[in-house]
Amino acid sequence: ANKFGAVYYSPYYGNLKSKIPQIFSVHDMTHERFPNHFHNQLDFEFINQKKDCLHRAEALLCVSNNTKNDVLDIYPQIARDKVTVIYNGIEDVFFTKPVESQQNRPYFLFVGNRKKYKNFPLLLTSYKNSGLSKDFDLRIISPTNDFPTEEEKRTIADLNIHAFLKFEHGLSDENLRDAYHNAIAFVFPSKYEGFGLPLIEAMASRTLVIAANASSLPEIGADVPLYFDPQSGDELTSRLVAAADMPNDMRRSRIESGAALAQNFTWDKSKEAFVKIFMRYMLN
């Protein structure tokens, strides 16, 4: 790196030391904001490695202003002028025309992993309390085949909603786009996101969105989603009911606004901002 490089970049930290400037992308500060969720030795090693990278970096590229503010709040020694926000993009396929649903029953949609800060149990309880299971399923799409966990089995049994939950994993982007599009609403109950890719994927796929008013989600979603307090099951229940009962003209208006907003989050726009940062060092 020192002999042949002008700048060293890592999208996810590392232990390499160098004489040339180092740049890192910062995706979130989840470990630092939720230390009670991370207990093993690998977690501690990762946090220490990340902290070292953030302090020795010449520049930090944060995926949202929320993440930037978290970095500066948790590590106030870091100079503000070395932290830049470059929003993520989403894959182009989410902007392409989806395939209309062949589902027998309409559904609400949850996408992603279900780590504790993702707040998935609140969605299960709110879905049950809404009384909507008689007409709407809850579809769950995960990157891995990990549903339900033992804890989730107990919750689902207590709520008696097993028959209305539909689980899938490892979908292609095309199939995920269609799943977003055909949902009555995509629900994002997470307490914390560094950026929140599913939020923009859903909007680009022309989907109504229900989202927690926490961390980066209001920054990224602006005034498009139906927001709720992630600590309030009653608020989420009311948003589910509102989505189910929403008049078609209001639904279309929100979906159109979301599709327009999503155009701001492409990889081409991210790439342009990314290159500008690197050219400062390549031209020196």
Image (cartoon, rainbow, N blue to C red):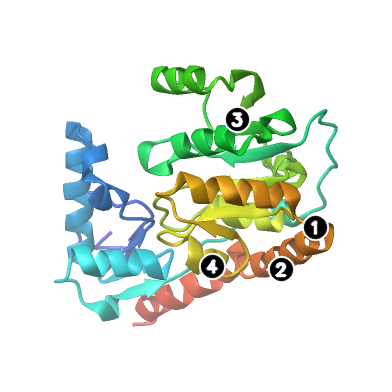
Eye-nearest disc, 1 or 3: 1
Against 227, residue 183 (above or below) is: above
Q: CA distance from mark 1 to mark 3?
A: 33 Å
Mark 1 / mark 3, whichever is N-terminal: 3
Against 223, residue 153 (above or below) is: above
Q: Position of residue 214 (x, y in %)?
A: 42, 59
- Which amino acid, mark 3? Gly
- Which amino acid, mark 4? Ser
Quarter assignment of residue 183 = top right
Which residue matches tag 1? 247
Circle on res. 270: 4
Q: Are marks 1 and 4 in contact (CB under 8 Å)?
A: no
Q: CA distance from mark 1 to mark 4?
A: 36 Å
Residue 16 is at least partly visible in this image: no
- Tally the numbered discs: 4
Query: Judging from the image, what secondary structure is the residue with disc 2 in?
Result: helix
Eye-nearest disc, 2 or 4: 2
Which one is in front, 218 or 30?
Answer: 218
- Which amino acid, mark 2? Ser
Quarter of the N terminus within the rendering: bottom left
Q: CA distance from mark 3 to mark 4?
A: 26 Å
Which residue matches tag 3? 170
